[in-house]
């Protein structure tokens, strides 16, 4: 009797232990899955934010750079504690005197709404307790919107269109296609949507905005193709839309009707890629100036030189001789590889020996 009693208790304890271990494993897996999801979403948002900042503000929507600068200076007069301002394109950098007057702190307001001035802004501040950045941003925003209204200019809030969580998951494969059953597609063949944009209003915009706007318009079959033509002297910027066709039509007007499954093809500008023709051995022990000139002649534009101060006599290794050529990709420095494709502005570092 005692034996069976002990056996039952042991089995019960083992069952509880196994159940607890399984639950712990599930919780651990769930934690890492959630952490990965949060990190992925955070990375997407950062990528989208970086793209917005990198989109050049054109000041061609009815408000010139001079108009914007005047608005900023006029708004500064309403907040006496702002000591200094610097207007750099669509970003305003400010220095504020503390309440005691013994120290200063800084903030910035960024009005670059995907290359446009709409009044939407983003702020960063060293002093999270102060409402001065928001007050200043609101003053400028109000003046921008008032000026646009007085000129009868109605701009979309471009940032509201950007769908960072769904269609912009892979910047290198910017496409959107809504999966649906054959019957649903068949029934939807005659379903049409009214265009909300003229073709000319989408050309030269950032592809993030264009795809998001077309998706919001109701289109379900969007593909994009990069045109790798941005080099050292290019006037275009990465992801700038070059051409759009809807079922082969490149010129279309607001209000025209198209099928929701019309084939939309977007061409956008991308950075030129250069195929590395040499191995590391080709550059090793050559003079660093000649190596830099050769890399520049290939089309590379972002070349740095770093000294290795290790020579004593210079008999074995010559002064200025190259030890290694590295490329910096995703904050990692790695040796160059023959036949590898690198963007023209990839950071290249030449390490060379000297006294």
Image (tube, rainbow, N blue to C red):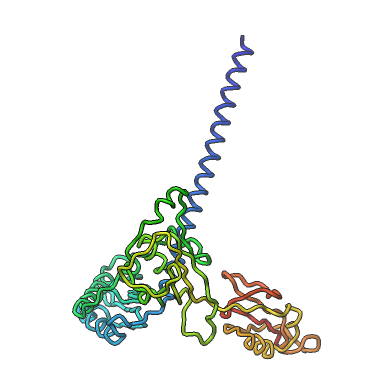
Say how many tags the image has. Answer: 0
| Above-or-below relation of 4 to 117 | above
User: In terms of depth relative to the viewer, which is nearer, 115 or 328?
Assistant: 115
User: In terms of depth relative to the viewer, which is nearer, 227 or 293?
Assistant: 227
* Residue plotted at (65% across, 72% down): 334
Residue 126's quadrant in the figure?
bottom left
* Residue plotted at (33% across, 72% down): 253
Question: Is residue 299 rendered to the left or right of residue 59?
Answer: right
Residue 192, position as x, y percentages in the image? 35, 59
Question: Is residue 163 rendered to the left or right of residue 223?
Answer: left
Q: Quadrant of the N terminus?
A: top right
Residue 68, position as x, y percentages in the image? 28, 82
User: In terms of depth relative to the viewer, which is nearer, 90 or 252?
Assistant: 252
| Above-or-below relation of 176 to 71 | above
Residue 71's quadrant in the figure?
bottom left
Q: Could you tell me if residue 173 is visible in this image?
A: yes
Residue 345, position as x, y percentages in the image? 56, 80
Q: Could you tell me if residue 106 is visible in this image?
A: no
**Residue sitting at the far top:** 1
* Residue plotted at (65% across, 84% down): 307
* Residue plotted at (39% across, 53% down): 188
Residue 131, position as x, y percentages in the image? 26, 68
Q: Quadrant of the C terminus?
A: bottom right
């Amino acid at each position: 009797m005692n034996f069976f009693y002990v056996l039952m208790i042991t089995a019960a304890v083992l069952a509880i232990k196994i159940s607890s271990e399984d639950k712990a494993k599930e919780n651990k897996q769930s934690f890492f899955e959630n952490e990965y999801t949060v990190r992925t979403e955070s990375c997407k948002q950062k990528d989208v934010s970086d793209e917005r900042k990198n989109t050049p503000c054109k000041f061609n929507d009815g408000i010139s750079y001079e108009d914007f600068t005047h608005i900023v200076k006029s708004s500064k007069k309403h907040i006496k504690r702002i000591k200094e301002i610097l207007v750099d394109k669509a970003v305003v950098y400010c220095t504020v005197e503390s309440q005691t007057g013994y120290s200063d702190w800084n903030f910035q307001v960024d009005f670059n709404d995907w290359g446009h001035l709409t009044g939407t802004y983003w702020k960063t501040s060293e002093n999270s307790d102060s409402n001065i950045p928001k007050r200043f941003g609101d003053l400028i925003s109000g003046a921008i919107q008032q000026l646009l209204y007085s000129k009868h200019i109605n701009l979309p809030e471009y940032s509201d269109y950007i769908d960072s969580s769904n269609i912009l998951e892979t910047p290198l494969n910017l496409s959107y296609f809504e999966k649906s059953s054959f019957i649903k597609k068949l029934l939807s063949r005659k379903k049409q949507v009214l265009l909300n944009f003229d073709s000319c209003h989408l050309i030269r915009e950032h592809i993030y905005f264009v795809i998001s706007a077309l998706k919001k318009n109701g289109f379900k079959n969007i593909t994009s193709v990069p045109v790798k033509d941005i080099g050292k002297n290019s006037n275009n910027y990465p992801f700038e839309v070059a051409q759009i066709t809807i079922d082969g039509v490149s010129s279309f007007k607001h209000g025209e009707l198209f099928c929701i499954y019309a084939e939309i093809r977007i061409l956008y500008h991308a950075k030129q890629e250069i195929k590395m023709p040499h191995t590391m051995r080709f550059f090793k022990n050559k003079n660093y100036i000649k190596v830099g000139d050769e890399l520049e002649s290939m089309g590379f534009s972002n070349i740095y030189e770093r000294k290795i101060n290790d020579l004593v006599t210079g008999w074995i290794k010559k002064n200025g001789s190259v030890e290694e050529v590295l490329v910096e990709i995703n904050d990692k420095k790695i040796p160059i590889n023959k036949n590898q494709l690198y963007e023209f502005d990839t950071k290249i570092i030449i390490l060379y020996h000297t006294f």
